[in-house]
Amino acid sequence: MPVCDVRSAPLGIGAGSLAILAALRDSEAKTLVVENTARLGPYTDLDGEGLNALVKQGRSKGYVVNVGHVTTEVTALGMPIRNRFGAPIGAISRRHPKPDDGRTDRNLRAANE
């Protein structure tokens, strides 16, 4: 299984940094995606448009799901950690082997209720 070193990867690679990107203001997130689009290739099958779609989805759900975009055999979840003003200050993420049969969304919805 190919594994990439995400320590120097652009923001949005990996569920934790994708959760942070989704938690930023729209203008900040879009600027970062545009600035980093050329750097995505070695890390993911996503382009800027695909990354923006995951950001949008993450905003609507409150968490992100990365299904094989970094490592094809892995699904990863990420949630931003926010300060008292709502700004992202970090993230928590968890990865697990694919396939995901919908349990991820059901479990996260149940945890948020």
Image (cartoon, grey):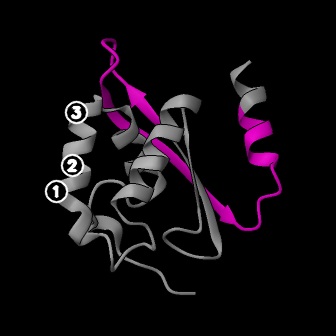
Neighbour class for label 3 at 10 Å: few (<14), some, many (≥20)?
few
Decide: is 89 above or below 98.
Answer: above
Instruction: Locate residue 73, reporting x and y percent.
Output: 65, 76
The spot of residue 18 in percent (x, y) is 41, 49
- What SS does tag 2 mark? helix
Find the distance from the CA under tag 3 to the CA under tag 1.
12 Å
**Mark 2 to mark 1 CA distance (whole Å):** 5 Å
Whether residues under marks 2 and 1 lie with C-beta atoms below 8 angstroms apart, the answer is yes
**Which residue type carries mark 2?**
Leu
In the image, which residues are magenta? 79-108
Left/right placement of residue 70 relative to residue 103 reads: left
**Marks 2/3: CA–CA distance:** 9 Å
Label 3 vs 1, first from the N-terminus: 3
Q: Image quarter for residue 40?
A: bottom left
Residue 35 badge: 1
Q: Circle 2 is placed at which residue position?
A: 32
Q: In which quarter of the image is the C terminus?
A: top right
The residue at the point 38 percent across, 61 percent down is 13
Disc 3 marks a residue whose amino acid type is Ser
* Secondary element type, mark 3: helix
Q: Badges 2 and 3: C-beta atoms under 8 Å apart? A: no
Residue type highlighted by circle 1? Glu
- Where's residue 43, x and y in %? 37, 74
Q: Does the magenta stretch include residue 19?
A: no
